[in-house]
Image: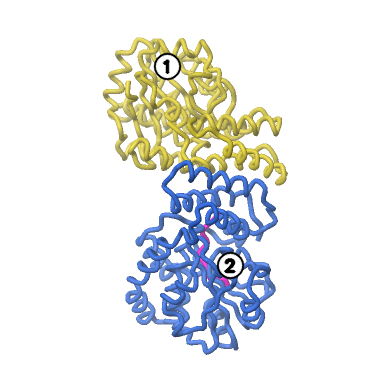
Chain colours: A blue, B yellow
């Protein structure tokens, strides 16, 4: 999926946000934003939005010398969702169709996305949780998805964000698949989940955890490690969470199920699904 | 009021919007946005937001050769509000305090602001109209404002946007002040009202109309014509509509009443009034 002009203001908004995370000095913040403007002005727009965001956020880390500007944000959302975990588990277990509920909640958890929305509150997350129980998941069929899980010999699950990864943990726990591998980003970028977040979410009890070897806020296959590509190529089924993974993999000819909330107009136009919707989209495998 | 980093994404969003108004060619649109990025990267941020928007929109007019990219947008909103005029007049005349209602409606009309919000619908305008009747106008006192109108020997009324100017006409008609002059921008910029819009709104029947001599989407006094400055300096009272006039005049030591909707977080922070509020703010005269 190509970068669109409408992605420009969004990318700049995140650069301002990251600039404020790394420094309180307004002139340094301005320098970071100026650098972002110059990166975008010289960018190859045939790239995907995460490929451009990768360059911008790498530059912010270089300029500031801070390896993980979103460290606190990630911790905050991990802790917040952790505090909701018993309640979420109960919601799943007491629902008529626990597996379906776990899928829905994993989609709802994708609301925790600094790449698409800043300033998220606990209420926003709770509203998203309620929305999946009261609204239809659009784009695909959950039962068909679950049927595919049962038939798959091996599954690769691509995580998206910190905080959200605890929702992923609940789904992975419920899926009880004997051969499921969870892949996280290779390095910190925005609030995307890393190995540390996957470990803190306790996923190692239910799945093998690998890194994809890249610092893009998505899955740029040409940059991923050999190990990751082995899992990617050999998996019968890929579950890809969130916008960044969709934007980088939507044209791949693999059996990919994208689980995400539609959060921006560019994605709404690309998918034909309106903003604010919980979506399950199967790739053109 | 100084430009803030948070103004950057907004300014770029308008540049994308204007780029699409002047051309359907995506590479030309990208060129326009790249130019905006470079203008902002090299900008003096001690300027006000309208001073920077002025440079950006001037450059778009130069690059495209189109003198008035928002011509159709302005016509659309003029026609839309024109079609509501009888209903709005009735709302004023049938209200318990017609003059107060006319002031409130003039504030509501400030929702028609391409500089702050794009893609406005008729419903948004109608909602804004309802809001002023159901919500309090924040920041100042309408009766004190009206008392000032009665006492003023001469009033200068600074218009803001096309469409909105019909709301201004209703207020000016009701004020029945013997010495009120309406000033519009000197040249087209964004959807700001020009002489043509003031004439089409029929304001000449109730007030003298002058141009301010500048193409900034606000009132940059150092750029205004001698004629305008004579009116500005001699007026006992200035009624300034909208965000652009607020951003450029909020520090002036004149008897200015700002009538506007608070539409962006930067303005909300500067005024201490929350977004979506109808506001009447008196300057630190």
Name the quadrant of the C terminus of chain B.
Answer: top left
Query: SS at mark 2?
Result: helix
- Residue B132's x, y, as percent? 35, 36
Position of residue B204 relative to residue B15, above or below, is above
Which residue is at a point 59% across and 23% down the rendered structure image? B187
Pick whichever, A254 or B134, lies toward us.
Answer: A254
Which of the 4 quarters of the picture holds residue A121?
bottom left
Can you tell which mark lies on residue B156? 1
Give neighbour class at mark 2: few <14, some 14-19, many 20+ (Cα, 10 Å): many
Separation (CA) of disc 1 from disc 2: 56 Å
- Residue A265's x, y, as percent? 56, 54
Which residue is at a point 46% across and 79% down the rendered structure image? A171
**Which chain's residue wears label 1?**
B
Pick whichever, A10 or A28, lies toward us.
Answer: A28
- Residue B111's x, y, as percent? 45, 36
The residue that disc 2 covers is A245
**CB atoms at circles 1 and 2 under 8 Å apart?**
no
**Which chain's residue wears label 2?**
A
Pick whichever, B55 or B78, lies toward us.
Answer: B55
| Left or right: B224 in relation to B251 | right
Q: Is residue A142 magenta?
A: no
Inspect this view and state whether residue B239 appears: yes
Position of residue A164 relative to residue A233, above or below, is above
Give neighbour class at mark 1: few <14, some 14-19, many 20+ (Cα, 10 Å): many
Which residue is at a point 54% across and 32% down the rendered structure image? B52
Name the quadrant of the N terminus of chain B.
Answer: top left
Which of the 4 quarters of the picture holds residue B98?
top left
Can you tell which mark lies on residue B138? none
| Left or right: A223 in relation to B223 | right
The stretch in magenta equals: A258-265
Position of residue A4 relative to residue B141, above or below, is below
């Amino acid at each position: 999926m190509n970068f669109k002009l409408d992605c420009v203001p969004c990318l700049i908004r995140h650069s301002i946000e990251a600039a404020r995370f790394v420094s309180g000095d307004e002139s340094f913040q301005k320098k970071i934003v100026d650098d972002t403007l110059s990166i975008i002005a010289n960018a190859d727009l045939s790239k995907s939005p995460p490929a451009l965001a990768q360059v911008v956020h790498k530059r912010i880390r270089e300029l500031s010398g801070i390896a993980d500007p979103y460290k606190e944000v990630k911790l905050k959302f991990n802790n917040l969702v952790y505090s909701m975990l018993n309640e979420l588990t109960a919601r799943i277990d007491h629902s008529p169709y626990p597996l379906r509920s776990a899928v829905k909640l994993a989609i709802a958890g994708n609301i925790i996305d600094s790449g698409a929305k800043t300033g998220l509150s606990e209420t926003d997350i709770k509203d998203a949780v309620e929305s999946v129980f009261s609204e239809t998941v659009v784009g695909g069929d959950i039962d068909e998805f679950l049927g595919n899980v049962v038939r798959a010999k091996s599954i690769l699950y691509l995580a998206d964000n910190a905080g959200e990864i605890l929702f992923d943990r609940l789904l992975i726990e419920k899926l009880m698949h004997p051969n499921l591998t969870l892949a996280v980003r290779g390095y910190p970028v925005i609030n995307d989940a890393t190995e540390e977040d996957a470990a803190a979410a306790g996923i190692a009890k239910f799945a093998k955890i690998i890194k994809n070897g890249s610092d893009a806020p998505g899955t740029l296959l040409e940059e991923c490690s050999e190990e990751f590509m082995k899992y990617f190529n050999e998996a019968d089924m890929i579950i890809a969470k969130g916008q960044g993974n969709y934007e980088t993999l939507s044209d791949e000819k693999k059996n990919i199920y994208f689980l995400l909330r539609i959060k921006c107009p560019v994605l709404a136009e690309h998918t034909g699904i309106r903003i604010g919707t919980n979506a399950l989209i199967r790739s053109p495998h």
